[in-house]
Amino acid sequence: TTLFLRMRELQQLVRDAVPKARHPSQTDLHKRKAHNALHPRDLRAVDATNPHACKNPSVVVRQHVIVCNFPPLRCVVVWDRLLALLPADDHELADELQRQLADQLYPDTSAKPVSTDDVNTSIEENESSQSLPELDDEAPFELRALEAVLRTCTLRLDAACEEVEPVAEETMRELQTARQVALASLERLRHVKNAVSHLEARTRDTAEALEAILDEDEDMCMMRLSLLRERPRLFDPPISPELLTQHEDVELLLESYLQDAEAVQTRLELIRLRIDNAEDLFGMKLDLARNRLITADTIFTLLGMVVGAGAMVGGFFGMNLHQEKSSFVIVCVVTASALMLSTAFVFWYLVRSGTLVLA
Amino acid sequence: TTLFLRMRELQQLVRDAVPKARHPSQTDLHKRKAHNALHPRDLRAVDATNPHACKNPSVVVRQHVIVCNFPPLRCVVVWDRLLALLPADDHELADELQRQLADQLYPDTSAKPVSTDDVNTSIEENESSQSLPELDDEAPFELRALEAVLRTCTLRLDAACEEVEPVAEETMRELQTARQVALASLERLRHVKNAVSHLEARTRDTAEALEAILDEDEDMCMMRLSLLRERPRLFDPPISPELLTQHEDVELLLESYLQDAEAVQTRLELIRLRIDNAEDLFGMKLDLARNRLITADTIFTLLGMVVGAGAMVGGFFGMNLHQEKSSFVIVCVVTASALMLSTAFVFWYLVRSGTLVLA
Amino acid sequence: TTLFLRMRELQQLVRDAVPKARHPSQTDLHKRKAHNALHPRDLRAVDATNPHACKNPSVVVRQHVIVCNFPPLRCVVVWDRLLALLPADDHELADELQRQLADQLYPDTSAKPVSTDDVNTSIEENESSQSLPELDDEAPFELRALEAVLRTCTLRLDAACEEVEPVAEETMRELQTARQVALASLERLRHVKNAVSHLEARTRDTAEALEAILDEDEDMCMMRLSLLRERPRLFDPPISPELLTQHEDVELLLESYLQDAEAVQTRLELIRLRIDNAEDLFGMKLDLARNRLITADTIFTLLGMVVGAGAMVGGFFGMNLHQEKSSFVIVCVVTASALMLSTAFVFWYLVRSGTLVLA
Amino acid sequence: TTLFLRMRELQQLVRDAVPKARHPSQTDLHKRKAHNALHPRDLRAVDATNPHACKNPSVVVRQHVIVCNFPPLRCVVVWDRLLALLPADDHELADELQRQLADQLYPDTSAKPVSTDDVNTSIEENESSQSLPELDDEAPFELRALEAVLRTCTLRLDAACEEVEPVAEETMRELQTARQVALASLERLRHVKNAVSHLEARTRDTAEALEAILDEDEDMCMMRLSLLRERPRLFDPPISPELLTQHEDVELLLESYLQDAEAVQTRLELIRLRIDNAEDLFGMKLDLARNRLITADTIFTLLGMVVGAGAMVGGFFGMNLHQEKSSFVIVCVVTASALMLSTAFVFWYLVRSGTLVLA
Amino acid sequence: TTLFLRMRELQQLVRDAVPKARHPSQTDLHKRKAHNALHPRDLRAVDATNPHACKNPSVVVRQHVIVCNFPPLRCVVVWDRLLALLPADDHELADELQRQLADQLYPDTSAKPVSTDDVNTSIEENESSQSLPELDDEAPFELRALEAVLRTCTLRLDAACEEVEPVAEETMRELQTARQVALASLERLRHVKNAVSHLEARTRDTAEALEAILDEDEDMCMMRLSLLRERPRLFDPPISPELLTQHEDVELLLESYLQDAEAVQTRLELIRLRIDNAEDLFGMKLDLARNRLITADTIFTLLGMVVGAGAMVGGFFGMNLHQEKSSFVIVCVVTASALMLSTAFVFWYLVRSGTLVLA
């Protein structure tokens, strides 16, 4: 049960899943092909080996197929199976998808040979679905699979957000209290910020992909793959307006996960703002500290200048006065008082003018 | 009267409130379940114990139920009762909700055993509702309850804004006048800014939740739970266009609170801009102060260098000249005038070139 | 003629103005009250004494009433009068409103006892309305009153903008040329910036209030209070689509003032950008000045170090050499040339490496 | 041929141009005046002498008149003439408008006495219009005039952009290479930035004015002044939906110039970003230079301190040892090596800890 | 086979391609010319020699012609050929376009004499189109050509992004680890940032051009040039609503490339954010380094002042005490301890007050 399918195999699988004989009428005006049929372009988008594969989240609805592309979670939903193309080493993602699918499905699925993600789940009803079971009985497979995919996707976003938040908080705390390790903290904060930006873009694109589907009545209608399989004519081009508005279950499903994505977005936005805030504060603290340092430096320079003046006087007079004690003392006293007075005056002036702020 | 309900109990309560026997016709094309019926997902969103509960404000309208999620105010409105899930320790919120509900309801409510929030209010008409009473008589319970919830929600936002504004003003004033305590003020300003961002996001999301409902004619129609209960067929899927546009009372109600939320948004935005402004000013003040300090430092360095030169001359000549008074005086005078002249020249040059700004 | 009305009086006045007997049919499906009737909420919004009154501009159209809320200009327009709730001390605003109303009204208004704002204007046709008089003859009172209110409002915004712009320019000029008073200028610039932000938010909200009305066909229809009073049935709920699109005069009126508000918005935006720009420039000037200062400081430190070295040599040798003239001269010359050479080298190195920029 | 018209004259001219007798039916429900008739407000907007004239670009379509307001280019287009209100001293603008009009018009225009802008152009077909002449033959005068106005307007924006770009580039280059003239460059950059912001706002508002017209089917219909003049009943209020959608020529015209305006917008945005970028870089260069200076300063301070220590030792021992050569030499050597060793150690420590970065 | 066509030749070519005789009916109400016919303006936009040619990406659909303007890729698609106007020296672009066209076209194209871009591709089916061939058989030439153009365009954007990303990463790494070369790195980073901004604007405009087409049902209909050529009446003005909604293949095509463009946009946005982040970090590192330097400087100044004080004492007393050993030692010891004590005290004070941060 490999998780990676070769593109060609995937196409074969999809082709098997799509009903063959029931092509739409050929009497159509422009000899159009099957309405909204799957195009090679659509599958190329989920082909992780394609260097030009679209890396933005998207949900594409085609006849008989739903292609969900939430990298690294790439899935193709057909009426009775969910084909997942996952990175070979991301077992967590595979497990999570399986768990969500098991939660969604009741024990009526048959074995699926290709992918491990379509699991025969034992009859386990989790509490919340059990409590209102009669309402949930009839959702077709494709919607359950879609819900599993969307739930996996939003849970992943949530988990990533959950993961990044404490790191951000920790780094900000470090930055605030740290004396020495600030550089390393800054470096780490930068990584956190990049991660938050990345996550924000991903979440925003996920939300936009869901919004795009919610804006398209036709796409939401076409999502009922099981119904479409049974009655393929139902969605022949001029779809009846009545039918076009009956996609309430799909809409509620998508809206619910859209809301989840938006909640994650808000949360990430707040984290980003907090980080910006912490950085600004840190910058200001550096500025404050610098001003304090320069204050000290200025005082020492002033004192150094004063003692230099004393030394100059000493250099000129020191020796010459050693015979006359009295004049030596006089010079000493005069010099000392002149220096101290001028220092005091300069201090007073600087403090009064607000240049020196002693604290 | 506990405020916390277990999820299961809540579901039971909601199920009791929703009329049972009057299911929509089963002849429906896709064997669809009750139109827009409550899904377990919807209740999960207001379950505060659920770690993945959606934390974004939302108003969800389902058949017979309105689910309001303005964390921490989570309410479920059914046709004759308002179930509130409040944090156990937020008595203020509970009191406020009760007060608002009492304001909205006239003395025709019966006892509600589950929640204390559905109160039998004595007949107290507050002044403003009294003045035009005949217009307000017929609003059904669900709209009054909804109004109580929305009013509580916007009042809370307003109160939070009211609370944060003086703190912000105070901190900014501190920052402006402070000499020494600046670091603590900055720290506090950062907390205020985070609080403002947080509040802004919450207010914006609240406004968006109200806008989302205002964009959905069907949802506003479905809000008339009492009418729907009496005549459940009225809202069977192809809702008549005439009915779809008759939700003026709901619309006015929502618009009014949307406007309140937007007013809070504007106010918070202005607070944020003022804080940014104060921070920028503070940064510039630090820069100005630093330039002044460095000016002083440079002057002292210059003078120190001058006296150093004097000391050097003294070191070389001082001793050697002590026998010859006249040459000693000559050297002293020459040195002193040379130093003073060159100092004056350097000063003049620096001031003229704009490097030194004496003030 | 007090300008402040008590809420209760206002409600009475509004109730008097609204025709009583002509209630809409009671056969309505949901026993709905008068279509779009005035709700206490709507009046509460213009009640300046209410601490929770909405402070955002809004125009609310209800049956028989238009409530304009452009704080501090709060007006209620009914079919034959304009009730204005103005701050007691803002005589300018009252005068301006009166003047605008006089401009709009031709001499057919009777005395209004409650408010001074509904003035009997003598027949004064201002030039522009005189030139195409036949086109303007038939505008009903309510639209003229609304125009007076909107014109007062946009003129006020314009005047505020006019007032703030020269102050901003002056402060920026000060900042640019100032040497000493920079701190006071910065403080003033901050106040100007706050004022501009505040004004911008107010203008934006005013424009949004006008846009909101322009988006609602029904509201614009309902603004024809006189017509509605004469033929109240005309706007009974299913308003004919034909009627819904006939609000061209209202639309042109609102669009014109929306454009004025947007022009003010653009102007304020440009002022804000200019201020930001001036601040950035000022910051850079500080940085440049600091670099120059530090350059001077570094040079003086270098020279100080050099003379210090000279002093050290003098300290060691000065005395010991005073007996031998020749070796004294040699030491002096060697020391001096060594110091001067090394200083010159260091200078050359620093200048070449770009560290010292002499200018 | 004065370019400035007095408001009153303009109104007279417009009234002459508008067909008089063919007023719409008076049987209209609300005794409405001519559908979408010109209001004094509309002309006031293009009155440059009016201090409250709207300064934002706009295109206003009224019955029989198109009012284009792209300050300083203010034009009124009627079915057979283009009235332009230009600043008296902007001959370039007048020339450009004439040239564009000549390009648009084929030799079928009669003399227009009032304005020089309506020129009798000789039959000169420019190359591009010549190549597909049969397609362009039938455009009515008003659209050609409008195209001339729009083309003049966008060419002016383009020219302004063309003018500001090299100045911006030049100033940025100066800033990058300059050593001494940085302050003047900064000042100039600030002016360029203000100019770019101003131009950006003007371009954006121009684009928005065009978009606003493109959003209004009715306005685009009403632009066919010639058709309307011939068959005034055609646009009587309930304009037929078929007619409402037939404005393809106007739409293409407006879209084309909208695209031009957007191209200018993109270009200006890029210039602004480049300037911001250059400023940031300049700021960082200042910071880097400052760090280098302080590095030098610190080294000199260190050396100064070292020679100070040497001088102190010399001061204490210098003299006292001059009798004993050997101990003098010992003290000298010990002091010198101690100072050099400790200096080396301090250097090594500072470099290792990353404080000193020698380069 | 020159790639540059003279405008006049292009017009001739386009005119040849457009069917001549089948003009729409002349009975049309306003004697309108061919619906949506090509205007000289449209071709002027792709004329690279025109200095006022629009430089913003756009897709313009006219009768029988699609004009794609993605500078430097300018193409005109008619029903059976693709005319490309490429810069003479951009062979890569020409090759890429050819390759893409070959990928799109099956071996049914005849020789095209004018342009090398319309190639007779040998029957080479690339893997992905081969796998679902039956679905792709019937796409008309114009859509294949359009797809080739769009694919070339988005691949170019992708390639430009691919190119700029490693340079950005490399420069950021340099900036982080660099000691000496920072200035050059900053310069390079600025170029990268300008490039990213430029690319972002181009990508955004490309996406907007595609969105604009996707918003216009009629334009998407008119893109079926082959169908239109066969049945020109089909798109006569009142296009049937049914036809208006049948453009699914065009829509899917455009949406797919819109998604690609948006993915590039997200990627560029993240690069820009990372660069901003790296710059902020670099600025903070400079600040941190400066604080460290100033700390060292302050310590040296303090020590310099101390030794200066010692030298002053030595200057005064040194000589005078050399006769009395004991008092000399006493003065030495007292001075030394006083200086060391006061230094230690100042240090302790500065460290405790947080001014000095030793690390």
Image (cartoon, coloured by chain):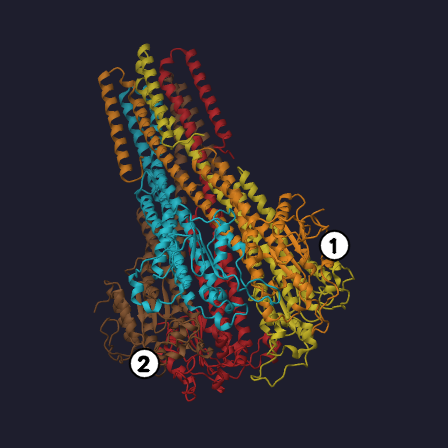
Chain colours: A orange, B cyan, C brown, D red, E yellow
Give whichever of C197, B225 is nearer the camera: B225
Q: Which residue is mark 1?
A: A8
Horizontal side of B14 relative to B190 (left or right) equals right
Q: Quadrant of the C terminus of chain A?
A: top left
Horizontal side of A116 relative to D190 (left or right) equals right
Secondary structure type for disc 2: helix
Q: Chain letter of disc 1?
A: A
Measured as percent of width and height from the top left, residue C39 is found at 35, 67
Above or below: residue B167 compared with residue C148: above
Residue B284 shows in this picture: yes
Q: Chain letter of disc 2?
A: C
Measured as percent of width and height from the top left, residue D162 is found at 50, 62
Give whichever of E316, C135 is nearer the camera: C135
Give whichever of C168, A289 is nearer the camera: A289
Q: Which residue is mark 2?
A: C130
Are labels 1 and 2 assigned to the same chain? no
Above or below: residue C302 compared with residue B168: above
Residue at image location 27% in from the left, 23% down from the top: B326
Q: Are marks 1 and 2 in contact (CB under 8 Å)?
A: no
Measured as percent of width and height from the top left, residue B52 is found at 52, 48
The type of residue carrying mark 2 is Gln
Residue at image location 73% in from the left, 55% down from the top: A13
